[in-house]
Image: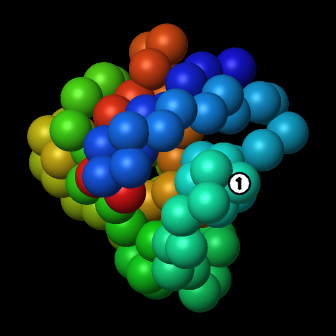
Amino acid sequence: TFEIELARTGTSVLVGSEETVLEAIRRAGVDHPSSCEMGICGTCEVKVLAGTVDHRDDLLTPAEQESGATMMACVSRSACPKLVLDA
Ligand code: FES
């Protein structure tokens, strides 16, 4: 379990092990786009303002994953207690 803070609304929600970041964003009341929900299309990409991502997508290059600037909310998770997202 980790926390996500949605910077645009100032809301925070916990993401449980059975839930995706995308689902948690929507549960927080934010209408976030998605398509494949398998980490391959990029529709759900969200900017990461703070925190370390556990990337699980098949789209970002290793360099992009290393930079940690964005994540695919449908599959990727957090490698730290709290992520701050531009959502
Ligand atoms: Fe396609 Fe997340 S919805 S990568």
Compared with residue 52, is residue 28 higher up or lower down, i.e. above or below? below
Q: Residue furthest right?
A: 18
**Would you call the spot at circle 1 few (<14 residues within 10 Å), some (14-19), or many (20 or more)?**
few
Tell me the quadrant of the picture where the N terminus can be found: top right
Compared with residue 68, is residue 45 higher up or lower down, i.e. above or below? below
Q: Nearer the viewer, residue 4 or 69?
A: 4
Under tag 1, what secondary structure? helix
Q: Residue at x 44, y 20 (%)?
A: 82
Whether residue 40 is visible: no
Compared with residue 13, is residue 28 higher up or lower down, i.e. above or below? below
Q: How is the image coloured?
A: rainbow
Disc 1 beta carbon < 8 A from ligand 1? no
Q: Badge 1 is on which residue? A: 27
Callout 1 amino acid: Arg
Q: Nearer the viewer, residue 71 or 4?
A: 4
Q: Residue at x 61, y 33 (%)?
A: 13
Q: Residue furthest top?
A: 81
Tell me the quadrant of the picture where the C terminus can be found: bottom left
Q: Position of residue 21 (x, y in %)?
A: 60, 48
Q: State which quadrant residue 10 falls in.
A: top left
Q: Residue at x 62, y 60 (%)?
A: 29
Q: Residue at x 85, y 39 (%)?
A: 18
Q: Position of residue 24 (x, y in %)?
A: 66, 48
Image-based side of 76 in relation to 59, left or right = right
Q: Position of residue 33 (x, y in %)?
A: 51, 80
Q: Position of residue 48 (x, y in %)?
A: 27, 44
Q: State which quadrant residue 3 falls in.
A: top right
